[in-house]
Image (cartoon, grey):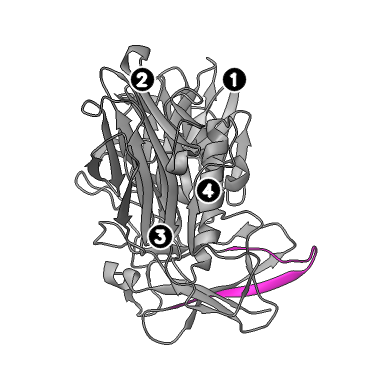
Amino acid sequence: MALLWMDGFDHYGNVISGDASARLAKVYTVSNSNTILCTTGRYQRGTTFGGAGCIYMAANKYGTTKIYKPITPTSGTTHLICGFNIYLATAQNTVYINSGWAGPTNGVSIQGNVLKCNNSTVTTLSLATWYHMEIRIPITTSGSNKYELYLNGATVYSSSSASWNWTNGLHFGHVDNNTQNYTFALDDLYIMDDTGSTNNARIGTELYVPRIETTYPIDDVTNNFTASYTPITSTTYGFENLSAPNAATILSNLSINCGFTSLTYQGTESTYFRVDSSGGVSNSKCLVLRVWATGGVTTTAVQFDTIASSFSFWYRESSSFYGSTAFSITVNGTETFLTLTGTMQQYTVTLNPNIVNTIRLNVTDATNNRFVNIDDFTVTYTSKNAAQNLYKNAESSDYLQSTTNGNKLIGNIGNLNNINSVKAVGFMPLASESVSATTSSYKLIANNGGPDTEIGSTQSVTGTTTARAPQFFDINPLTSASWTASDFNALKAGVINKT
């Protein structure tokens, strides 16, 4: 065993990013006198706002906000390697990363924006900058088993005498004494020990920053389970059912009706991001993205994720100054500018159905007061796509169920984005029993084009509370060899009922 835990924090996001404490509590111990948000991560798909790619500690009052991950090292472990990406938002707080939550001693701390180890000053960090850190944590003490800290691949602290004071887990959090808002973000967390033959030493370098990306099922090619819902295959939504809604209502309805997730917006709600009757398709209600440079707003946008094969919408500018306003759609980082006129016209884009596509509609104008009307979002999905609904509401009342031993649910998994080297793969099923106080069991199954193969250990769930049960594989259990990106992109995975 080497890899003990990893988390990219992508899958804790809900429809509209908010307090993620309840979801995090399924795999961490959460101390949350304030708020823990899901927000844009170090490697978040798309542009610089929106989506859930990391967790962000938000301190809106005095107190402690943190997560704790219990870790049991493998027998024979002498040290752990803990790596993560960290972003410091403000210098008026104290961030702790340690095992016993004992203040700045026996761990890493950031006091103001000064990075310290065991309360010894290491360096000063810049605000609003992502850093990659790795900590070599001694479990057994000897002169050669050093406590070391690496920052962006370089050694910044090393000591054979300083103690980490390991107590079977790790805390990540802060103590706030200045009523600050956002404090720091954490992303791409992994914890390894030094046993086994794979992933048993630190992996970050100056040129290589480890990345943890979450992909989702894109269909259900074998499904003996019964869905509690009707999967979305094609839908059109035109905002007609909304009356003077706030931004949260607009985004929620896009999620419910179109299957979008990680929805965010830019621009003051009701004034610049709103729904009204100014004229959509057939002169109906529509989404309005307004910009007004004199009012201090030069950009208004909406962004969302979808697993789909195509997306289309109608649009026009509702004023008569078509030449000065820029309207664009960005799909997975590629921006296309659309010509604006006073007449409604339709735009359709083909999407990659094998990945989570990030789409942003963006209006800018540096001078004038402009309105762009958008209407009738149409989305088409591939195959049966039961997984699309589960991805949209990963911990809602939507589920697939089976009461028969041996029933399978298996599907294609979304492809990796711009990743050529795979160190390990983790599977994150969410499961519950339909009856309180009853225990049921399941096991992971996978294939790479061959027969369905049971992998990992049997998992049990008791009662109706949804539980996460991650399992990690340093090597491909189907080939007993190191993972490759092509192996992963050919992967089909799911569960088999073992009740």
Give the label, 4 or 1, closer to the camera: 4
Residue 63 visible in the displayed image = yes
The residue sitting at 26% across, 17% down in the picture is 367
The residue located at (61%, 82%) in the rendering is 407
Of residues 476 and 334, the one nearer the viewer is: 334
Say left or right for 39 vs 465.
left
Asked if residue 70 shows in the view, the reply is no
Instruction: Answer with the quarter of the image where residue 338 lies.
Output: top left
Figure quadrant of the C terminus: bottom right
The residue indicated by pointer 3 is: 308
- Between the residue at mark 4 and the residue at mark 2, the CA separation in whole angstroms equals 26 Å
Q: Name the residue under label 4.
A: 255
Q: Position of residue 97 (x, y in %)?
A: 47, 36
> In the rendering, which numbered label is found on residue 297?
2
**First in sequence: mark 4 or mark 1?**
1
- Mark 2 neighbour class, 10 Å CA radius: few under 14, some 14 to 19, many 20 or more: many
Q: Distance between the residues labelled 3 and 1?
A: 41 Å
Instruction: Check the image and report above or below for 305 versus 242.
Output: below
Q: Within 10 Å of the Cα at label 3, are there few (<14), some (14-19), or many (20+) other Cα atoms?
A: many
Q: What element carries label 3?
A: loop
Comes first in the chain, label 4 or label 2: 4
For the record, the magenta segment spans 430-446
Q: Dots 2 and 3: beta carbons under 8 Å?
A: no
Judging from the image, what secondary structure is the residue with disc 4 in?
helix
Residue assigned mark 1: 61
Q: Using the numbered discs, state the Cα–Cα distance from disc 4 to disc 3 in whole angstroms.
A: 13 Å
**Magenta run includes residue 14:** no
N-terminal of the pair, mark 3 or mark 1, is: 1
Circle 1 residues within 10 Å: few <14, some 14–19, many ≥20: some
